[in-house]
Amino acid sequence: MNNFTVEAFELTRLYGGREAVSNVSFNLSKGQVLGFLGPNGAGKSTTMKMLTGNLAPSNGSVKICGIDMMENPKEAKALIGYLPEMRPLYKELTVDEYLTIAARLHRVSAGSIKKSVEVAKERCGLSHMSKRLIENLSNGYQQRVGIAQAIIHNPMVVILDEPTVGLDPIQIRDIRALIREVGAERSVIISTHILPEVEMVCDHVQIIDKGKLVFNGSIDVLKKQRIGNKLLIAFGNPPVVDELLKISGVVEAEALPGNFMRIRFADDSAPAAAIVQAAVNNGWGLTQIAPDQTSLEDVFVQLTYQEQVVSEQVAA
Amino acid sequence: MIINVARKELKSMFASPMGWVILSLLMFAFGTYYLNGVNDYFAVMSGAMRPAERTGVTQFVGQNVYGFASFMVLFAVPLLSMRLISEERRSQTLPFLFSAPISLTEIVVGKFLGLVTFLSILVVFIGVMLTTLNIWADIDFGYIVANSVGLLLMIASFSALGLYFSSMTQQPVIAAILTFIALFALMFLDRFFAGDPSNILASLSLTRHFQSFSGGLIDTADITYFCLFVATFLTLTVRRLDADRLRG
């Protein structure tokens, strides 16, 4: 037995001949938080529906803790907590009533239902909302009820489809903390559009575009791609490019409008101090020096765009 | 697990005013019929001189109330069954049930039992109401039991059909209308074939199978008919929901 909590193997889903998801394979281990990224209509939600047994894959298989979703759906589903994109809330019930039903349906033993409802409410900050009708709760609180419903039976795998939509910044921070907390002992899969969020909570990232997995790896790889070995420098009295290239470690320099310069340096060097020293010695009038970060958005666009270019080239 | 789904349905039904309103209105109507029945009994029986013309008070009042009840559930069931699945489909709460560790059959049977349990409150109330006649008269309990069983089976069949139509659409109102039309046709099928009672189609009529119960007779053939009717539509509902999972 391996330690994988989720194993997806060549998941494919056809909608009338069109592939909404094609050949998505990945594994997830205990204690990992996986972020699912992708533009609209990329197949994130479809993949999640297949993982939770809400949708039958056209091809491929899903295993939860080694249990096949197709063969033993009940046992597999018992290990999953799922919050779909549209919150499945019965609005005519109160928070307590709803969570009790959720606990019962997820086979929480009769004796511990009360306790697990209390714990779930506390973890999601809902304790003071117990007797309120879900209908009357604000969007953010409804979202919390949705999350509470997904973690109430303490599942091995928690799957949240865009969990932070509609929340205010403080709530988002709480939910992220909760996701990390759950992710420490269990496995969590979240999908999101908010890129910095992925960096904050996930330790594994998958980027999916047009139903295909474009990137699958550790968040560090993505971070590296993002930060790179670049510095952005502003001078009051900018030197010529060649001057900068003389400094050891600098491989490339580029003058930008507004007296800015961008330099790229070799992997094992840290030329910042040397540049400052040179600026002082030569009177370049250094006003600013900072690492130049490509935003995660750029990386994302690069990844999804590159794939497009490659596939177009292949087609041609 | 089936019980948990049924409990959830009952909770939803009592959480909305719809359930209470239907229960109270129907009970009010049945109570009125019961009172009228008792009044009429004395009026009619005082005119009936020969012993052959006389019927028991249980049968006289019971026929009145149960006949009316079997007609009224024709309106009540579609109103209650329409929301069972279509409402969940519309408010997208079905994934909540689908991702819980319960099978589709359990979901469908649970929902069905929830509705039948809710409506059986009516059957019990009618039974208790008629039993109060026992204070003044010596009533025929067998007749009441047979009628209650018949009414319950009828309600179960209506609910199964209603559940199926509810699983086909996102609009509760459409489900209600379809259910009503289908039930109406099935109820009065034997009227269409009144001239030819041996016709096979006529024996599909729900009313015809209720008749033996309303006469105080528990016939296994009729019980089988109702059970098959329920099983058929529950199976169709499960298949309809499974198609959701397969086709998306």
Image: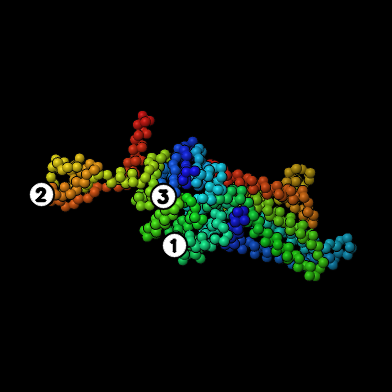
The tag earlier along the polypeptide, 2 or 3, is 3
- Which is more toward the observer, A303 or B215? A303
Comparing labels 1 and 2, the label whose residue is closer to the camera: 2
Q: Are marks 2 and 3 in contact (CB under 8 Å)?
A: no
Asked whether the residues under marks 1 and 3 belong to the same chain, the reply is yes
- Which is more toward the observer, B167 or A263? A263
Comparing labels 1 and 3, the label whose residue is closer to the camera: 3
Question: As drawn, is A189 to the left or to the right of B210?
Answer: left
Label 2 marks a residue whose chain is A
Placement of B131 over or under B164, stated as above or below: below
Q: Amino acid at mark 1?
A: Gly
Label 3 marks a residue whose chain is A
* Residue that badge 3 annotates: A33
Q: Residue at x 51, y 55 (%)?
A: A153
Few, some or many residues within 10 Å of mark 2 (<14, 14–19, 20+) = few
| Element marked by disc 3 | strand
* Residue that badge 1 annotates: A125
Q: Position of residue A118 (x, y in %)?
A: 50, 63
Q: Position of residue A6 (x, y in %)?
A: 47, 45
| Element marked by disc 1 | loop
Q: Residue at x 12, y 45 (%)?
A: A239
Q: Amino acid at mark 3?
A: Val
The tag earlier along the polypeptide, 1 or 2, is 1
Label 1 marks a residue whose chain is A
Task: Name which quarter of the figure residue B134 lies in.
Answer: bottom right
Q: Amino acid at mark 2?
A: Asn
Few, some or many residues within 10 Å of mark 3 (<14, 14–19, 20+) = many
